[in-house]
Image (spheres, rainbow, N blue to C red):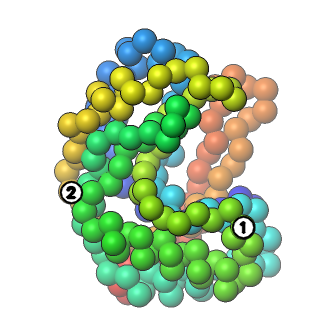
Amino acid sequence: MRLFAAVLPPADVLAELGTAVDPLHRIPGAERLRWADRTGWHFTLAFYGEVAEELLPGLHERLARAARRHDPYELCLARGGRFGHRVMWVGAEGDRTTMRSLADSAAAGARRAGVAMEDQRPYDTPHLTIARSRGRRPEVDLVPFVTALAEFTSVTWTAGELTLMRSHPPEAGVPGAQPRYEAVGRWPLGH
């Protein structure tokens, strides 16, 4: 199964972000973006890819240990950003040091549990993906979208849980289909 470790913002924070994102759909070119489904908005800490069923008990044990070693921390969603002309996101402000440490622990724990972590990059830019360009070449200038979110800051909340998420691929042949995410493990931080 395809898995990743994540921090999930609370519903009220996601609703606040939704209110800020709604006007972006009226910017020219918005219809040429693939907008992430709001039910799947999250901060990926570590991407595991395909994980064999027999590795799950060890992965669960390592993630529980990682969560215990990190105290809850304060975060808020803040400002838009982009990776080139391919991905538009909203960032995080607050205790990014603890978030980065939790991400490192989630990746290290998975490696110790036997999960291949070949594609893991350093956790430099905590972000929640909002939209992606369709196709291989950049078709939409993301600058106006990012600029529209330049002043956005959500309320602050306490990130208190590490979540193991399963990604179900979008339904083949269905235009606009989105991946579906399912929580398959949750561990409170600091306990």
Residue 105: x and y in percent read 51, 79
Q: Does residue 111 appear to the left or right of 80 in the view shown?
A: right
Residue 146: x and y in percent read 36, 32
Visible residue check, residue 130: no
Closer to the eye: label 1 or 2: 1
Q: Does residue 12 appear to the left or right of 40 in the view shown?
A: left
Question: In this view, which residue lies farthest toward the top?
Answer: 28
Nearer the observer, 139 or 13:
139
Residue 150: x and y in percent read 26, 36
Nearer-N-terminus badge (1/2): 1
Q: Are marks 1 and 2 in contact (CB under 8 Å)?
A: no
Nearer the observer, 178 or 131:
131
| Mark 1 neighbour class, 10 Å CA radius: few under 14, some 14 to 19, many 20 or more | few
Q: Quadrant of the N terminus?
A: bottom right
Relative to 166, residue 37 above or below? above
Q: Which residue is mark 1?
A: 118
Distance between mark 1 and mark 2 Cα atoms: 34 Å
Visible residue check, residue 56: yes
Q: Which residue is mark 2?
A: 156
Which structural element holds mark 1? loop
Q: Amino acid at mark 1?
A: Glu
Relative to 54, residue 157 above or below? above
Nearer the observer, 77 or 151:
151
In the rendered image, which quarter is residue 68 located in? bottom left
